[in-house]
Amino acid sequence: MSKYALLLDALAEADQPVAVTAAPPMPREWLEAVHDPDYVDAVLSAQVAPDRERRIGFPVTLEVARRTLAVAGGTHGAALHALRHGYAANGAGGSHHALPDGGAGYCVTNDLAIAANRLVAEGAARRVLVVDLDVHQGDGTAVIFAGRDDVLTFSMHAARNFPVRKARSFRDVELPDGTDDAAYLALLATELPALLDLRPDLVLFQAGVDPHTDDRLGRLALSDAGLVARDAYVVRETRARGIAIASTLGGGYAVDRMAVARRHAAGLVAQWQAARDFQRTGV
């Protein structure tokens, strides 16, 4: 069972009430607004070339194609809910490696980019800030929005990790192997406020848990408590400025998938509590 299917079980373990809403699948036209239409056609017809599937890391079946539309719709739906209510989360998403011409790194299409582009194009948001705290650089999102000032990309990631050839985000922070909770959180506290001061209407938060010290694809050394503190800080700082925030799961890899699901669940609980506390107190 995938970590996505296990997430609700992990939230139930945490005794956390969750309101689950199914967002409409993303219409094809919005995938084609950020990805090559021929590639989108190949995805939706499950005819992606073998060399591209190797770059993605798995076969693109019709079920994967349906999931791709659902995930992008979920990120867009979470963003719309956040713009109305302050905070929301997609229980999947964060596929930040997908580039304009195709997928890569377990990402078929880039739900963050698809959602952000649609929000701006339809006037739901004037400016979107993507805060990507996955252990891997959000290279696809950076490439898609290079040179634009209505969608800004921030990636704080392990320097010596995938992708080998990094893109250029609006702001990149590269971390040495073994970065621990204290160093990570201190650096984040020096970076995030200045980006939020650029006054986006919405933050799309890629909350990957692969900076965890036990993650099999990470090179950092955050603890469970460090990841929880990270997520709470991002939501608290964002909401304190009156900015809406929608989160996506991002990466997290281990043989024990339930352990990964629990890390994601703990982060979601921390995010929700930070958003709720702001709504109650305004601070």
Image: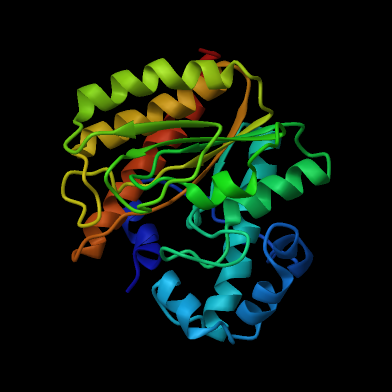
222 relative to 3, above or below: above
Q: Nearer the viewer, residue 54 or 200?
A: 54
Quadrant of residue 241 in the image? top right
Image location (x, y in percent) of residue 156: 39, 35
Image location (x, y in percent) of residue 244: 62, 30
Q: Do we see residue 149 in this rendering?
A: yes
Quadrant of residue 226 in the image? top left
Q: Do we see residue 77 in this rendering?
A: no
Is 270 on the left or on the right of 27, as rendered? left
Image location (x, y in percent) of residue 277: 47, 23
Is 221 on the left or on the right of 173, as rendered? left
Q: Nearer the viewer, residue 14 or 104?
A: 104
82 relative to 64, above or below: above
Image location (x, y in percent) of residue 195: 55, 21
User: How many labels were placed on the picture?
Assistant: 0
- The residue at the point 34 percent across, 53 percent down is 162
What color scheme is it?
rainbow
Quadrant of residue 38 in the image? bottom right
- The residue at the point 39 percent across, 33 percent down is 231
Is 85 on the left or on the right of 103, as rendered? right
- The residue at the point 44 percent across, 28 percent down is 234
